[in-house]
Amino acid sequence: MAENQRTETLSSFAPRHHPIFAPSAFPALTHCLHFRNAGTESTNAARGTSQHELLAKILTNQPIPEDVDANDLACVEWAAQVINNCTSAENREVEVGFTLLDDDWQEVTFGTADVVSMTPRATGDILVVVDYKSGSYKEYRPQLHVYSRMAMQRHGVNRCECHILYGMDRHDETFRVNYNETNYIIDIINQINADQLGEKKINEFCQYCSHQPTCPQTKAIITSITKSENYDITDIVDWKIENASPDKLGQMYLVASWLEKFSQRIKEGVKQKIKDGLEVPGYHFVSVTRRSISDIPAAFEASGLTQEEFLDACTVSAARLEKKMGKANFEASMAGLIHESVSEQLKRVGK
Ligand code: SF4
């Protein structure tokens, strides 16, 4: 990228008085400038972090922890394979921290791209930026546009190849972007700076927004649903869990469960339509096959591995082993060998 282009772009920033947005906020900001990240922690977020750490270890040839989850490992091994195919290892940087600065050297945004590499191809060198996702498909391109803009600035080029790798779905979303096509990122920042936030617009990232509990858009949807179901709790979004009475907590849980089922029904229905061949803009059907082997002795025979190597790839179902051995025998023999993970849920007992 020409130096004058960079100067022109950076000088277009208005003075900053907004919070600094991480690149992961831009997919939501593209739809709704009111979006503010709630920063909630979840099991999925923890899984995402551990898969990213694992991927970084594989790409930098560090030892893999022995107790790593087999599914996590399979997801990131697939991603590492794709990264090895689309980037050159010699020029590859892993977990690359970037900062975008304005004219006053103020931080506009910052972030860590999973992989950046200037990669030789038959048609010449191309800058490649890769982001790994442990969850399912969402419109993450704006996040990649932020990474690629920062990477293009650093490498002084105008073009970038982006890969969003969905480990769970084994899907590589590949696209190319030119520097000017990322200018809308700057427009977003400038609009927020100028307090020109426009209307709140429901989008697929609302669940991560700190405004969601009180957002009129969310409230309108919940109100219409709870009214149609004759639940007398249309002001649910104004309730605070900390102050709610036990009765209201029960009602809130009921509505939350109903909304969950409602969402599930819609998602399953749309998925089936697409599976049946209907084209729905922005979505495509992906099927993931999970593999397991039940004939362990035959697998051992066929593997050609030593017993120790083979057992390293095995897990045992505690429930099935307990059934075979009997509860008492199982408990006496297996105590100390069992890894426990607890899943917690509420069971409705009626009223
Ligand atoms: S919850 Fe409301 S404010 Fe937040 S992103 Fe969604 S529509 Fe915008």
Image (cartoon, helix red, strand yellow):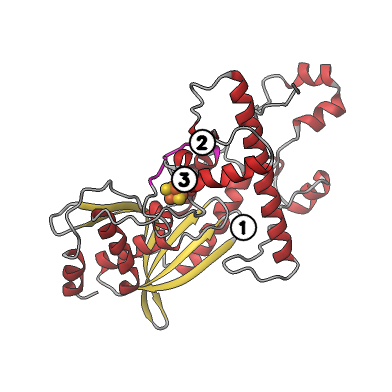
Q: Secondary structure at mark 3?
A: helix
Residue at the farthest bottom position: 123
Secondary structure at numbered mark 1: loop
Q: Is mark 3 within 8 Å of ligand 1?
A: yes
Q: Which residue is mark 1?
A: 169
Q: Does the image show residue 42?
A: yes
Whether residue 312 can be seen here: no
Query: N-terminal of the two: label 1 or label 3?
Result: 1
Front position in the image: 103 or 160: 103
Query: In terms of sequence position, does the residue under pointer 2 or pointer 1 come before the other?
Result: 1
Q: Which mark is residue 237?
A: 2
Q: How far, Cα to Cα, is label 2 from label 1?
A: 34 Å
- Classify residue 175 as left or right of residue 351: left
Disc 1 versus disc 3: distance between alpha carbons? 34 Å
**In the displayed structure image, the side of residue 282 where residue 20 appears, left or right:** left
Q: Which residue type carries mark 1?
A: Asp
Q: Is residue 256 magenta?
A: no
Look at discs 2 and 1 and give the one toward the viewer.
2
Q: Circle 2 — which element?
A: helix
Instruction: Compare residues 277 and 107 and report the one nearer the observer.
Output: 277
Highlighted range, magenta: 36-43
Q: Which residue is mark 3?
A: 216
Classify residue 88 by image quadrant. Answer: bottom left
